[in-house]
Amino acid sequence: MIEWYDQYARDLPWRISPVFSKKGIKPDPYRVWISEIMLQQTSVKVATPFFLKFIEKWPNILSLHQTSETEVLALWSGLGYYRRARNLKACAEILLREYEGGFPIEEKKLLKLPGIGKYTSAAILTIAFGIPAIVVDGNVERIIARLFGLDGTISKLKPEIRTYMMNVSPSARPGDFAQAMMDLGATICKPLNPECMICPIRDSCKSYKDGTTNIIPRKTKKPIKTFRKGYIYLAVTKSNEIAMIVRPKSGLLGGMMCLPSSEWTEKKYPKNSPPFPGEWVALDQTIRHSFTHFDLELRMMVSSIFSVPNSYILKPFNFSLTEKVPSVMKKALVLGLKYFHF
Ligand code: SF4
């Protein structure tokens, strides 16, 4: 695996090339941390441009600490799972306060930091510091299940996979080994139609020998998504400003700049209660959006207004061109602003 990695490692902006890692040079832990958090629920292809923008704006822990959470959330818009962005901010503060802006190099201490679980702590220890740790993500699970011909769903095989991974992990260049496994899973041992003919571990692979690469690992049934409904309210002032609100920190789209909306309820629409008085008009078209766990349908209400209560923030009607807003809000703005002929 290491020989293969030396030749075919993916060139990723948070990594250092194997040419340097062979000499004992380590990547910047800050970049490793940011990339691992972004990659928790996002593919490399999607995360890379976000990572580059993030690093350009906040190249180190101090600059991240000094910026506001709203700024970080704005940059995060489009990546989803906003809790990750809030955790980064909270974590930066602790790292500065308790670790002089560095990272603890003990799993126990890393696990106490917001947003850092078993996988991320192992990735930071092994990739950024060269400390052997068992890094098991979805790619690694798939490779190990196939390599050893483990029959079962990944959720059932997890403990077994960790043991196998412990047995195959080398003590030399553990970070490169972890990244080699990630690369193999992303480029060759893919979920569908793995490219076994060019795989560096084909000769040892049980499921290749057994012809079971397309059935191992066994698939788990996807949970059925629920369907929620609600109202969303677009109010525009005479000077073409929109009433926006920052959602409460906890919960979906927490801390993000959004249009006011009702609750989002299952089965039937909640009560239509506009957030403040106005001549509210219901639009015929609805907005549909898919979140990970549910699909959403929103009825759009629009109104011209003279003023808004103090808790609302007035934004220019075209602010979403320059500022990032959650995708569902973008859809609502596009639809609602047509009513006002913008
Ligand atoms: S031989 Fe095929 S199934 Fe086995 S590890 Fe390589 S790519 Fe995956």
Image (tube, rainbow, N blue to C red):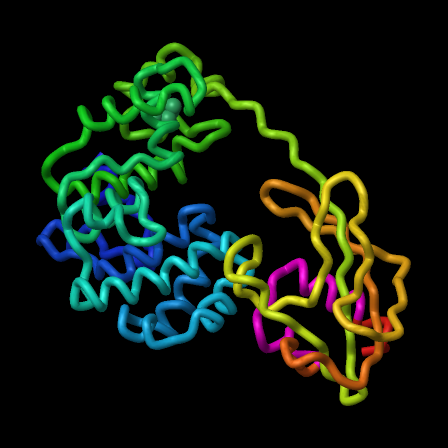
Instruction: Tell me if residue 24 comes above or below residue 172 in the rendering.
Output: below
Instruction: Tell me if residue 306 comes above or below residue 262 in the rendering.
Output: below
Q: Is residue 271 left or right of residue 114?
A: right
Instruction: Tell me if residue 202 comes above or below residue 111 in the rendering.
Output: above
Q: Is residue 296 left or right of residue 186?
A: right
Which residue does the image show at 20% across and 27% down from the upper left?
166
Q: Is residue 82 left or right of residue 287?
A: left
Q: Visible in this render: residue 334?
A: no
Q: Visible in this render: residue 135?
A: yes
Which residue does the image show at 58% across and 69% down from the upper left?
246
**Looking at the figure, which quarter contains the C terminus?**
bottom right
334 vs 14, nearest the viewer: 334
Q: Position of residue 124 (x, y in %)?
A: 24, 50
| SS majority, magenta | helix
Quadrant for ligand 1 reads top left
Residue at the bottom extreme of this rendering = 239
**Residue 324 inside the magenta-drawn segment:** yes
Which residue does the image show at 40% across and 67% down from the upper left?
54
Q: Position of residue 4 (x, y in %)?
A: 24, 38
Quadrant of the image occupied by residue 58: bottom left
270 vs 127, nearest the viewer: 270
Quadrant of the image occupied by residue 140: top left
Residue at the top extreme of this rendering = 210
Instruction: Tell me if residue 139 comes above or below residue 109 in the rendering.
Output: above
Q: How many marks?
A: 0
**Residue 322 inside the magenta-drawn segment:** yes
Magenta span: 317-336
Q: Position of residue 115 (x, y in %)?
A: 36, 51
236 vs 63, nearest the viewer: 236
